[in-house]
Image (cartoon, grey):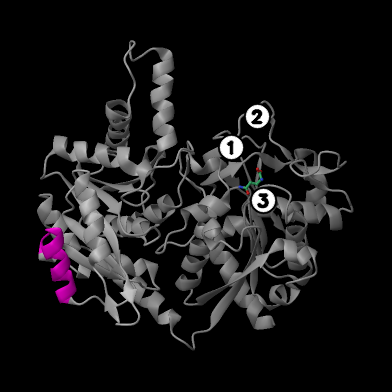
Amino acid sequence: MTKYIFCTGGVVSSVGKGVTAAAIGRILKARGLKVAIQKLDPYLNVDPGTMSPYQHGEVFVTADGAETDLDLGHYERFIDEHLNRTCNVTAGRVYMNVLEKERRGDYLGGTIQVIPHITNEIKRCIVLVAKETNADVVIVEVGGTVGDIESQPFLEAIRQMRQGIGRNDALFIHVTYLPHIGATGELKTKPTQHSVRELRSMGIQPQVIVARSDHEVEKELCDKIALFCDVDQEAVIPLVTTDLLYGVPLLLEDAGLGNYLVEALGLPRRKPELGDWRAMTARMRALTENGHAPVRIGIVGKYVELHDAYMSVKEALYHAASAQNRRLEIEWLYSGDLEKDRGWDVLESVDGIVVPGGFGYRGIEGKILAARFARERKVPYLGLCLGMQTMCIEFARDVLGYEDANSSEFETNSEHTVIDLMHEQRAVTELGGTMRLGVYPCRLVAGSKAGSAYGNADCVEERHRHRFEFNNVYRNAFADAGMLFSGISPDGHLVEIAEVQDHPFMVGSQFHPEFLSRPNAPHPLFSKLVEAALEHGKTR
Ligand code: GLN
């Protein structure tokens, strides 16, 4: 029998509901429970895959190739499970499923309504997670803030679900925010009270309130929330803003949330195994203290004003740096600036460079310039998807002398399209969900830098999201000029990893290794980049 925890948000958005859900997952997993987490997004896009990173932040790709909300990245990093396409459902997807059935005539002439048809479909999508993952506990995070018109069908659906499942097997957690009034130095509970009232008007009484705050929350304030919101005193969990993301599970655990949830849901009472996690966060915390030497990595991208657009890249770098006992300092560099001769001093100052994924021509020439700088100056470089492609274009232009080398994504008239549309993409007309997505195997070349990074494994599996690929016509020319294709698809057709041989570490992957990095298990390519960056730092 699966247990359900429904997380809603109140007062304001962006209070870290996703991290809270992920952290709850970790403290339950620490009790030996199998956990899955689902995000319900009330917007009408079918998935975030076609949304601008400025609107939405990173698109996280699951192993089974779904393009999902970046909160799924937090979930996977915290609970260390591979989630799947059932774990992110948008209102758009729900409506699409219902409308497809309607067009097929499945409703036999009935009138299709938000209640019950949309709410039933939402409930079906929630139950599907339990079926597909076999989890003991499914945590369901409802995106948006209580009171939004568009989240109403989702709230109604979870209300009905709890009614159907029963009190012992499902509960509601409401994550709110306590504003701080500067003039009086007080934290205020009124917005939380209002938000709970709003939730109650939908028929939902939260059993736990996680009260986010930028300031210490006194016990009396928690008791006041308990009294006015009608929850147990021990079920008001203060969660003060922390600079250490991975410390959140411990804050919740130490506030008693783990035991409370287990008790409320009738789950086995086990001592949580959080020793390793505690040791890891203690190490991470020590690194933030002054005096700790940093490793400085430049991320040269297109959406750098919005760090969320590179959430997994940022975290993967952090995991790798922390594991090597280094404080991570990221320099965010807009690639378009390099084209205008700006930002070079910053590039000069970093120990390593990452060129992350992306789409479209804006800023591409700057990324190519960054790759040239890395190659010529022997600065460690990791190219992720588009970053691998720009590394190859740079090599073609400068080493092979193909001055017009390009990707056919940006220039179809070039005589040297060293990056070209994948064959199976040629017939694709719709943009949503049609890229090469999800996990594919990659055979490694023994003795290569990538091969040794992966501990000389024969074959690895990594997650993808792209339409373009290295153009095999040019494989020999590149190889003769010193580029090693150190990762290839098992059928031999697709370049998955390329590396510049005469260089301490210049590696590009067609896949996105950042999605597989974990706080307690950094990804080998990021680890090698940081290692090489530390070496490079010494020589400067
Ligand atoms: N735009 C490139 C492609 O489609 C790279 C995609 C990416 O970086 N995720 O192949």
Tell which of 537 and 54 is nearer to you.
54
Ligand 1 within 8 Å of the CB at mark 3: yes
Element class at badge 3: helix
Could you tell me which residue is drawn at 40 percent across and 73 percent down?
243
Q: Are marks 2 and 1 in contact (CB under 8 Å)?
A: yes
Could you tell me which residue is drawn at 25 percent across and 62 percent down?
192
Q: Could one spot residue 276 in this view of the protein?
A: no
At which x and y percent is residue 492?
66, 37
- Residue 338: name its quadrant: bottom right
How packed mark 3 is, by other alpha carbons closer than 10 Å (few <14, some 14-19, many 20 or more), is many
Q: Which residue is mark 2?
A: 424
Q: Which residue is mark 1?
A: 436
Q: Are marks 3 and 1 in contact (CB under 8 Å)?
A: no
- What span is in magenta? 219-232
Left or right: residue 493 versus residue 132 is right
At which x and y percent is residue 476?
80, 44
User: Is residue 519 found inside the magenta-colored segment of the image?
Assistant: no
- For marks 2 and 3, give the CA distance: 19 Å
- Residue 179: name its quadrant: bottom left
Tell which of 244 and 215 is nearer to you.
215
Element class at badge 2: helix
Q: Amino acid at mark 3?
A: Leu
354 up-or-down from 473: above or below: below
Q: Which residue is mark 3?
A: 386
Left or right: residue 363 versus residue 121 is right
